[in-house]
Amino acid sequence: MVTKRYKPLLAVMVAFFLAIFMAGTRADAAQKPNYIISTDAAYAPFDFQDKNNQYVGIDMDILKEVAKRNNFTYTLKPMSFNAAAQMVANGQADGIIAGMMINDARKQVYDVSDPYYQSGVAWITKPNSKIKSLSDLKGKTVALKTGTAAANYGASLKDKYGFKVKYFNDTDTMYNDVVNGNTAATFEDYPVIQYAIKNGMKLEVRNPKDLGNGGGVGFFVKKGENALLLQQFNTTLAEMKKDGTYDKIINKYLNSSQKTFVGDTSDNNSMWGILKSNKSAFWKGLVETAKLTVAGIVLASLWGLLLGLMGTAQSKFWRGLSTTIIYTFRGLPLMVLAFFIYIGLPGVIGMKIPAFTAGLLTLILNEGAYTGAFVRGGFDSVNIGQMEAARSLGLSHRQAMWKVVVPQGLKMTVPSFVNQFIITLKDTSILSAIGILELTQTGTLIVARNSQGFRVWGIIAIIYLIVITLLTWFSNWLEKKIN
Ligand code: ASN
């Protein structure tokens, strides 16, 4: 039974989640339509960041032109290709432009624009590799990128040629796995690998004259939706082909002899050089991480406290509810929860959830469940005699809780809170998977551009350590104040 006195608790819970939900879904009052367009965060020459951390590439220039000529604005959501495609399939984004190949399977799920580029799948090894034909791959492992047409093509050959497959979320990590010799070969779209090789990637295409699954690259919207956007894309594409804009874009990325993009070596000399030339990106990533961490810590702590209180309530209903919530959200991996909220839920509730809101909600639910568990434990461990003594002095259950049990219980849980704060900070990195441009995602994008994994990840690790040290100092200070 939900006793009357716990009704306010339920109201607080509902208000709490509504507030978080609403915080991220600001009404858009602009007159111009604003579309959400997802893209592959690192897929040169189609989509990638330049040195100023601006998104450029064939896709980006075409999209910009389409928006300009049709008087709409768009919000770009760069992330892993697989997540970007799912965002559209689930109605989280209005369209995807990501060097994406048109094929029949995709036509079942999406409506597709006219092709704007021709592509086909290449298979790739290290230069001078002993692997000369697909048959040489027998028993070896091949690197593929999740959800891509090239991966489907590669996987379809796996039984025939007897190789194993290993999946990656981004092209650059996949390439480097082959370069480092962990996997023997990879499959990727020809223009993409060609571009990378031209810009210094130490790999070689084995079948340049015999590409697999050739076809066009297009812009995709969810089936049956955004017909106007698709039509505008097609019309503008045709116009651009006529007036020379299209050729200009293609030439800009494919025929220029300068090495300006992938494999950019200008900032590769040292950690310091990389830090300097990417300082605004690192800073922005850090700010995003800090925002998520602070908001996550505060809200998850409040939510955890509420769960802890519910867990020690007199009513069986509240205790049961608290146990169920803690069990569920402690049991779910953080990334699964993030994908569920960000990619799964919107399709069901018919409402877009901004990545930051989804990420924050994930942190609150997950970290809050852990917090709830140790807070409940803290309250439980306050000697039952304390409660009895308080009750015998004439205090009600609630008064006894607030005046006697809660203060003592909370003191005991301070070290656990500190621990949870640090875990929350580290967990924010997992939210890079849903495209939040925090520190880890920032690192992924920079490595995709300069291939300096060791140095970039070294910098990112140091930044995390510095922030964790600061957080620990702060927590210790807080702990002393409380005790
Ligand atoms: N070219 C890939 C595909 O068509 C997309 C990508 O990796 N961005 O599946």
Image: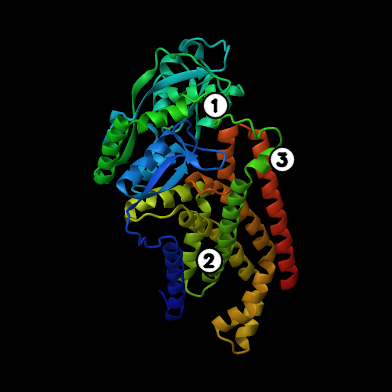
**In the rendered image, which residue does mark 2 sit on?**
303
Task: Give x and y (percent) for residue 368.
Answer: 54, 61
Residue 462: name its quadrant.
top right
**In the rendered image, which residue does mark 1 sit on?**
258
First along the sequence among labels 3 and 2:
3
Q: Please rate how many residues cluster around mark 3, counting C-alpha atoms within 10 Å: few if below 14, some from 14 to 19, many from 20.
A: few
First along the sequence among labels 1 and 3:
1
Task: Give x and y (percent) for residue 428.
Answer: 57, 51
Relative to residue 56, is residue 128 drawn left or right?
right
Give the residue type that dot 2 points to: Trp
Instruction: Using the numbered discs, state the Cα–Cα distance from disc 2 to disc 1 in whole angstroms.
Output: 54 Å
Most foreground residue, 217 or 179? 217
* Element type where label 3 sits in the image: helix
The N terminus lies in quadrant? bottom left
Q: Residue at x 58, y 38 (%)?
A: 446
Residue 382 shows in the view: no
**In the rendered image, which residue does mark 3 sit on?**
272
